[in-house]
Amino acid sequence: MERQRLNVQSSVCWIIAVMLSTGITLGQEKSNHQIKVLTVCEVLGDVSHHSDAAVAVVGRMERSVSLTDHYEFISQDRCERPVITHGHVWSNKIQILTDREAGMPKPPREKPGLERSAIAAKLSTIRKTTKLGFHQEPQFKVDRRSRTITYRHTASVPNQWAVVYGRIVTVPDLNEDCGARGCGGFDVPLIVIAESYNVHRLGADATPLPAER
């Protein structure tokens, strides 16, 4: 457990060292250049090609939520070409990072128009092998009179489909020895750095869902 914490901290430090709203208007095409719309498996299947590229990634949004931390990932099941290093098969997940700090790679700033038909086609492919499932989230009671928030219990919350437009960045262990000496952290090979307005939850038919409050 301690090694896992150290690896997570190491990954965050390395990223800093080297470096859900409705911002996308689905149904409109971007005029100046074509934005690639890819599934999670397509990105993971060619890491060297997509690294440092700005793409739109479609998949299942998962959340890791505790009393103190909140992380988001976009994932897909049963990828034919998962990322493998030193015999270690990485999870088919990409971490979503919207809280950018100085020194980190910059996310694309534009709010591109993506064809809903392109996103729907990718989502249709993903749904053949991937179920939404659930994740665990702590639930709280808000007392407005006393202005206090009290933890109540942890509940199962449904995952959602999503599309994220951002910059793909590899984690440091891909260039080191993950698998040769064990792997910690969240076991994700890639990160997509995005502006929060370029992270969109989707319905089953690829329709954008209302922004969360």
Image (spheres, grey):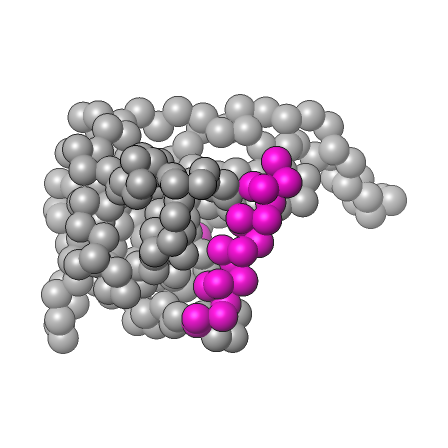
The residue closer to the viewer here, 117 or 83, is 83
Which residue is located at x 70 percent, y 35 percent? 140
Q: Position of residue 50 (x, y in %)?
A: 21, 58
Tell me: residue 203, above or below residue 44.
Answer: above
Q: Position of residue 137 (x, y in %)?
A: 58, 32
Q: Main secondary structure of the magenta part?
A: helix
Which residue is located at x 64 percent, y 32 percent? 138
Q: Position of residue 201 (x, y in %)?
A: 36, 44
Which residue is located at x 34 percent, y 56 percent? 175
Which residue is located at x 14 percent, y 75 percent? 32
Q: Is residue 111 left or right of residue 19?
A: left
Evaluate whether residue 121 shows in this view.
Answer: yes
The quadrant of the picture occupied by the N terminus is top right
Q: Quadrant of residue 207?
A: top left
The residue closer to the viewer here, 95 or 138, is 95
Point out the residue furthest to the front here. Answer: 180
The residue closer to the viewer here, 191 or 204, is 191
Evaluate whether residue 25 shows in this view.
Answer: no
The residue closer to the viewer here, 87 or 44, is 87
- Residues in magenta, as a range: 1-21
Q: Is residue 90 magenta?
A: no
